[in-house]
Image (cartoon, rainbow, N blue to C red):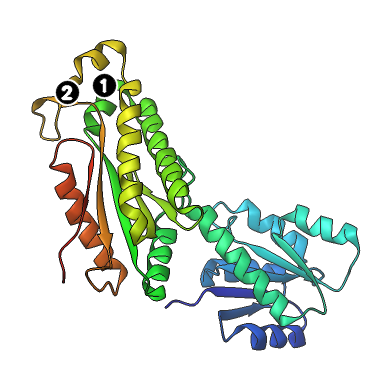
Amino acid sequence: MRKERILIIDDDPDIRDVLDLSLSEHYTIFAACNGKEGLEMVKTKNPDLIITDYNMPVMNGPEFCRQLRRDILQRHLPVIMLTGKGETKDMVFGIESGADDYLIKPFEPETLLARIRMILKRTIRSLDANPLTHLPGNSSIMEEFQSYIDADKPFAVGYADLDKFKVYNDKYGFEHGDEIIRALARILIDATQQFCGQDAFVGHVGGDDFVFICPDDKADAISQSVVDAFDKASPSFYNEVDRAAGFITGVDRQGNAIKAGLVSVSIGVVSNVHQKITHVAQIGELGAELKKFAKSVGKSNFQRDQRKR
């Protein structure tokens, strides 16, 4: 598993050594002596997080933060600022310069580690979130898959996406299509919370593809609730004429003229109850297979893998 990379910027070699000793077991560590050197190392070492001192020669911590935030490729990098000063105005100035968090020296290594873990997790989720639905994206989805596999408890993964969506987008436009995607996101969230509370996860793979992860014994109820709620909402996405007709005309991906019924949702449910799931890719392969079968039904439905392997 890849270790996250941390860049330490401090002119005091003793502080650099202490930080290296405290963090190197968990992270790959690089070090610079001042902000100017740190900016160069950001470009070559691609750190995941930066720890910088407040007062340094050549370029201090606040100026380093300001320069970093001007770089569109690097401005997302989280920064923890360290200082021996405990005055409120210095903390505020550091945060206003672009630091994400602040620690006063001396500090406990356990406190720093906890802050690092929290900031890295928050940053990954923020960068990974789908801009349309704000749901977690692929990195977070893979992380959740792995955590469920590692827990070795009965779980299920539902792969959901929309049917006849391309024809709808072609006629009504992407803005209306985005409304349907957001509606499906809300339906998935409502269904998982109804049956699991917070003991479930909903992610947005991209486009009109979603996943949910939940205890196995809740998956069927969630899936049926999603199907029912989406079918109830689907007619509202159409104008009165198309709603009354029950279909719209368009072309498929091969350019053939087709009639397409109202948009529906298909869900393929993968479970570890009847088979051993040992890796993340296995979930994706089974989910794609089941979702393809569900889509062949021609209406909103869910299909669960009952095969024993």
Q: Residue at x 52, y 57 (%)?
A: 125
Classify residue 258 by image quadrant. top left
Farthest residue in the right direction? 87
Farthest residue in the top direction? 241
Q: Residue at x 23, y 26 (%)?
A: 262
The answer to whether any part of residue 47 appears in the image is yes
The answer to whether any part of residue 37 appears in the image is no
Residue 242 shown left or right of residue 72 in the figure: left
According to the picture, the residue beneath numbered tag 1 turns out to be 171
The local secondary structure at tag 1 comes to: helix
Disc number for residue 250: 2
Disc number for residue 104: none
- Assign the C terminus to one quadrant of the image: bottom left
Q: Nearer the viewer, residue 201 or 284?
A: 201
Farthest residue in the left direction? 256
Query: 10 Å neighbourhood of mark 2: few (<14), some, or many (≥20)?
Result: some
Q: Position of residue 222 (x, y in %)?
A: 36, 48
Query: Does residue 39 sit above or below 163 in this rendering?
Result: below
Q: Position of residue 174 (x, y in %)?
A: 35, 29
Query: 10 Å neighbourhood of mark 1: few (<14), some, or many (≥20)?
Result: few
Q: Position of residue 9 (x, y in %)?
A: 69, 74
Residue 237 shown left or right of residue 140 in the figure: left
Q: Residue at x 39, y 58 (%)?
A: 214
Query: Does residue 160 sit above or below 236 in this rendering?
Result: below
Residue 236 shown left or right of residue 32 in the figure: left
| Circles 2 and 1 in contact, beta carbons < 8 Å | yes
Residue type for callout 2 = Gly
- The earlier-in-sequence mark between 2 and 1 is 1
Q: CA distance from mark 2 to mark 1?
A: 8 Å
Q: Nearer the viewer, residue 184 or 256?
A: 184
Classify residue 219 by image quadrant. bottom left
